[in-house]
Image (spheres, grey):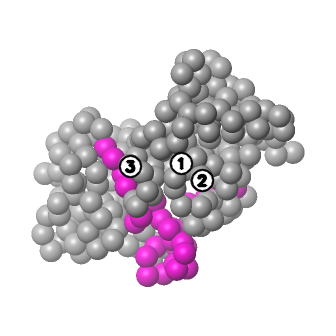
Amino acid sequence: MTEHTSTDADAAPQNSDTSDWSDWTAHALRLDARGELGRGPKGLLIDLPALSQPWMCASGLCTPGRRDPKARSCCADLDVVLDDDEIQRIEAAMPTLAPRLAAADSRWAAGALVWRDGDTLTRPGRRCAFSRIAPEGLRCVLHEIEAQDGLTPGALKPAPCRMFPLIWVDADDGRALLSAVHPRTARLVGTRPAAAFPCIGEGTLSLAESMKGALVELLGARGAAAVVKQVREFRR
Ligand code: SF4
């Protein structure tokens, strides 16, 4: 199996095989034995406890300087690795992005930032080059510009950011497991414990419901609806 997720900056690189496929298979078998493995379109396996956990972006609780010492943030602490298309889209947009970034963030106002190191986003000042500090916590300027300009989600914001904390694991037999950063999977992805991310366990909506847009991107509207339906039934 091959797993795809954002990973901890001081752990394994993103979108890599950080654990033996047999670990994920054993995880899926344990879920199945407990009646906690859902089935989605095209043989998709669903980690129902991970997709059912409450989740809500809580950047006020994870922003450096404001957070509990053990708290970590996807925008300040995780390596984000971009593919070639994502790098090209951001580079092509940079002439119009740069002034808007300068208006939003003091680091850009002081001069254009080196925003990538190879294929990985940089974190000057210990936070992503494309983040800004707002009263409510860290915000993604790429996300905000997409929304302001009516762009398709993902036109600028990289996939690992749109998917966190979901984990997609490709099986050798063509099937896949949809999971997430969760107390039972942290060892498998080599990331910080789920408890380090204040967003995990926050709010009342399940991760599947909160991240329906990402699920539509992965599975299409019907596939996403099927996952959300199973998660709702599992939570009852
Ligand atoms: S690109 Fe946006 S969402 Fe991704 S790490 Fe940077 S600020 Fe966060």
Q: Is residue 56 left or right of residue 109?
A: right
> In this view of the protein, can residue 22 be seen by the observer?
yes
Left or right of 227, for residue 132 = left
Q: Main secondary structure of the magenta part?
A: loop
Does the rendering let one see residue 224? no
Task: Categorize mark 1 by other alpha carbons within 10 Å: few (<14), some (14-19), many (20+).
Answer: many
CA gap, disc 1 and disc 2: 5 Å
Q: Residue at x 59, y 52 (%)?
A: 187
Residue beneath the point at 17% across and 50% down: 94
The total of numbered circles placed on residues is 3
- Residue 105 in the magenta stretch? The answer is no
Quadrant location of the C terminus in the rendered image: top right
Of the numbered discs in the image, which one, if any, rests on residue 189? 1
At x 76% / y 38%, what residue is drawn?
A: 30
Q: Which residues are magenta?
A: 54-82
Residues at marks 1 and 2 touching, judged by CB atoms closer than 8 Å: yes
Q: Is label 3 in contact with label 1 (beta carbons under 8 Å)?
A: no
Q: Position of residue 33 (x, y in %)?
A: 83, 34
Please give the residue where the numbered disc 2 appears in the rendered image.
186
Q: Which mark is residue 13?
A: 3
Q: Are marks 3 and 2 in contact (CB under 8 Å)?
A: no
Give me the residue at 15% from left, 74% from top.
Answer: 110
